[in-house]
Image (cartoon, rainbow, N blue to C red):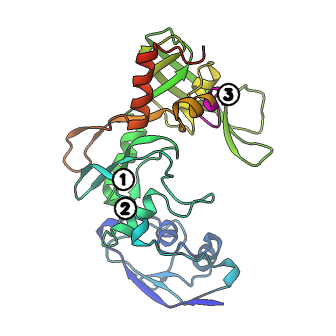
Amino acid sequence: MSILPLKKLSIQDEEKGQRIDNFLFRHYKNIPKSHIYQLLRSGQIRVNSKRINASYRLEIGDIIRIPPIKIAEKNFIQKTPLALSSFFTFEKLFEDDALLIIDKPAGMAVHGGSGISFGVIEQLRAQNSSWKFLELVHRLDRETSGVLLLAKKRSALVDLHRQIREGLTEKHYLVMVKGEWRNSKQHVKLALNKYITAAGERRVAVSTGKRKDSKPMLAHTIFKLQKSWKNFSLLDAELKTGRTHQIRVHLAHLGFPIIGDDKYGNFEINKLLAKNLNLTRMFLHAHTMQIIHPISGERMKLQSPLPEDLQKFLDGLDKSCGTYWG
């Protein structure tokens, strides 16, 4: 049995407006959420000496009293500190008091979970322990590289989420597909469904309208042809919505799988490219994002150059005229 001591926390400016349950989840990541909800329902956690419910929104100066918490070892999630030697040095594209924008490498998850101990957010928090607030504004798949936004102020996070909801941001990806794309510009609007495979993996598919137990979500992508070869095409993909695996599923459904995609791609082509050209990752890169700075109101355009491995593959296509495995 582990016992966490009594705590009294004072709410500062950046914590204003948060629901108390979300605030507690962030501060007590080693406690099951169900236990936190039980403490709230029973009135053991109080704000300004009063009982509150889980939807209470915090105000500056609020005093939260959290009682000593007993928790069984089997439910205790042990957090192993990150060793300094394991820190990854992220390339910063922009940073000020409100924002941190990095160039995320491929192969690194944005957050821990599903067998991954420490993602981008955990590493950045460990590297900058003096920061009071740091949250992801959006996500990128583990194998996707490129522009990743993080907020250093809650007010910045709230405003950027508003911009995303209202369509005020622009996100562009560079993607290489197998096949000869014909249209210079093509809007793709297809609803997507999430599902679980027999092996327990989470996947996404274009909705057929036959499943009554699912709620399909419309996904809109604009594809623009950048360059084509005999067997491959380089596209710019602009996200108008932000559904899980949206670009990957749209392209696979249209018969133009992303090369290197280990979930929705052409597995035989992927093996050949890995063996002969050492391309061992998915060719999907978040190269440009436009936002309005949440504090200054200035329009910003963030760009990430194509990583070396993807650029090398591109150069190889030019030399061979795109004749790999026709």
Quarter holding the C terminus? Answer: top right
Residue 79 percent location from the top left of the image: 54, 75
Dot 2 or dot 1: first in sequence order is: 2
| Amino acid type, residue under disc 1 in the picture | Leu
Q: What stretch of residues is rendered in magenta?
A: 260-271
Picture residue at 40% right of the left edge, 50% below the top: 137
Q: Which residue is mark 2?
A: 134
Q: Which residue is mark 3?
A: 268
- Asked if one can make out residue 71 in the rendered structure from this viewpoint, the answer is yes
Q: Are marks 1 and 3 in contact (CB under 8 Å)?
A: no
Local packing at callout 3 (Cα closer than 10 Å; few below 14, some 14-19, many 20+) is: few
Q: Which one is closest to the eye, mark 1 or mark 3? A: 3
Q: Which residue is mark 1?
A: 150
Q: Is residue 12 left or right of residue 260?
A: left
Name the element at disc 2. loop
User: What is the spatial separation of the Cα atoms under label 1 and label 3, in whole angstroms?
Assistant: 37 Å
Q: Is residue 139 left or right of residue 125?
A: right
Front residue (pair 23, 326): 326
Residue 84 percent location from the top left of the image: 39, 71
Identify whether 251 is placed above or below 72.
above
Residue 233 percent location from the top left of the image: 49, 17
User: What is the spatial separation of the Cα atoms under label 2 and label 1, in whole angstroms?
Assistant: 7 Å
